Image (cartoon, helix red, strand yellow):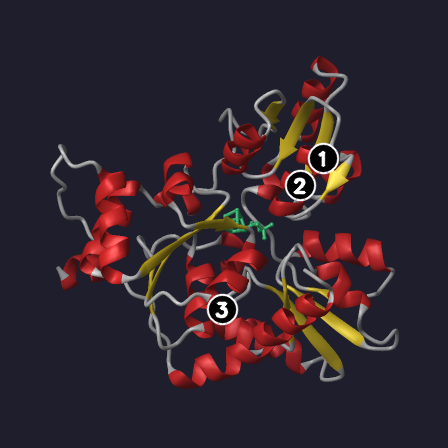
Amino acid sequence: MGTDVLTKGFLDIPIDLSLDLFREIDKLKKEKNAIILAHYYQDADIQDIADFIGDSLALSQQAAKTSADVILFAGVHFMAETAKILCPQKKVLLPDLNAGCSLADSCPADKFAEFKAKHPDHLVISYINCSADIKALTDIICTSSNAEQIVKSLPQDQKIIFAPDKNLGAYIKKKTGRDMLLWDGSCMVHEIFSLEKIIKLKHQHLNAKIIAHPECEPAVLDLADYIGSTSGLLNYVKKSDVKEFIVVTEPGILHQMNKANPEKLFLAAPPNNSCACNDCPHMKLNTLEKLYNCLKYEQPEITLSEELIQKSKKPILRMLELSAQFGL
Ligand code: 13P
Ligand code: SF4
């Protein structure tokens, strides 16, 4: 079994097809005092079985305060890693170790360390979508929910490096008027939305509001009526009187939008390829079957060295402190 995990990145153990996985996972959760944390980009069935669903900030806040012994993270690697950094004494599980993140991968630690060394007078703010090694090179972590406030809270003359997402960085530069040095990284999902197809969809739904995640490219963000993190987008559609929305982010978010607003229409923005939707291939590696095996056998588990935990924890705690001050 251990070899399976090492070679494939997940437990490829056949499951009895007659099992009710919802019930079995629930039973395992109780037996092991485990909690399932899921991101909004997970499949609907995984969101439905989770104890907590949220954006990256809410998920890290939840991980920091849970009293569970085991955290099963239904998300991607950097999210589970963040939970482990915050709770080193707990067992943190990720159903498939292959669930990475193109944005985190676009910022290798050795290259970033060289870049940082060239700008010793700059403070480093990194988006949470990065590896623990990058977090260890960072002064303050941020998410799309708090990046603007964190940047605004720094003295005007403070020089800043913002990594790894150039699109979120450019958006925050525009919002705050701060001249930040941006790392050239991006998300494979948010950078391939098609401007032309979004405009075409808008022509077919003239009353629809376009709402977008700040990881999208500037030309797409220029079209948007509202820009926000996944939880920001969810709150916006709940409060709005409008009945139709073109949603420019990973379509997993539509599950909660539809659940909370059954009378409204949510249209997933199309990418610039032949696919109809724009799923994150990393997020979608998690399945109910993998969750079940992962919880049952408590593998794959996230492990990090004590030194890396100590170094990468400081900038995350700084983010959590600042977010509490901002009332987030
Ligand atoms: P948020 O849910 O924090 O907005 O992040 C989006 C994302 O891309 C996560 O991978
Ligand atoms: Fe990474 Fe983009 Fe997938 Fe989020 S949606 S996990 S940023 S690749």
Label 2 crowd bin: few (<14), some (14–19), many (20+), radius 10 Å: some
Q: Nearer the viewer, residue 326 or 288?
A: 326
Q: Quadrant of residue 21?
A: top left
Disc nearer the start of the sequence (3/1): 3
Can residue 114 be seen here? The reply is yes
Residue shown at the point (47%, 42%) measured from the top left: 280
Mark sitting on residue 64: 3
Identify the secondary structure beneath mark 3. helix
* Quarter of the N terminus within the rendering: bottom left
Give the left or right position of residue 306, taking residue 17 as reference.
Answer: right
Give the residue pinned by disc 2. 235
Dot 1: what SS? helix
Residue 126 higher or lower than 201, as above or below: below
Q: Distance between the residues labelled 3 and 1?
A: 29 Å
The three-letter amino acid code for the residue at tag 2 is Asn
Q: In this view, does 245 lie above or below 239?
A: above
Residue 187 placed where, x, y %? 57, 49
Q: Badge 3: how crowded within 10 Å, few (<14), some, or many (20+)?
A: some
Does ligand 1 reach within 8 Å of label 3's beta carbon? no
Q: Do the residues labelled 2 and 1 touch (CB within 8 Å)?
A: yes
| Residue at mark 1 | 239
Asked if residue 147 is positioned above or below residue 290 in the image, the reply reads below
Instruction: Check whether the beta carbons of the residues at disc 3 and disc 1 lie within 8 A of each other.
Output: no
Give the quarter of the image for residue 250.
top right
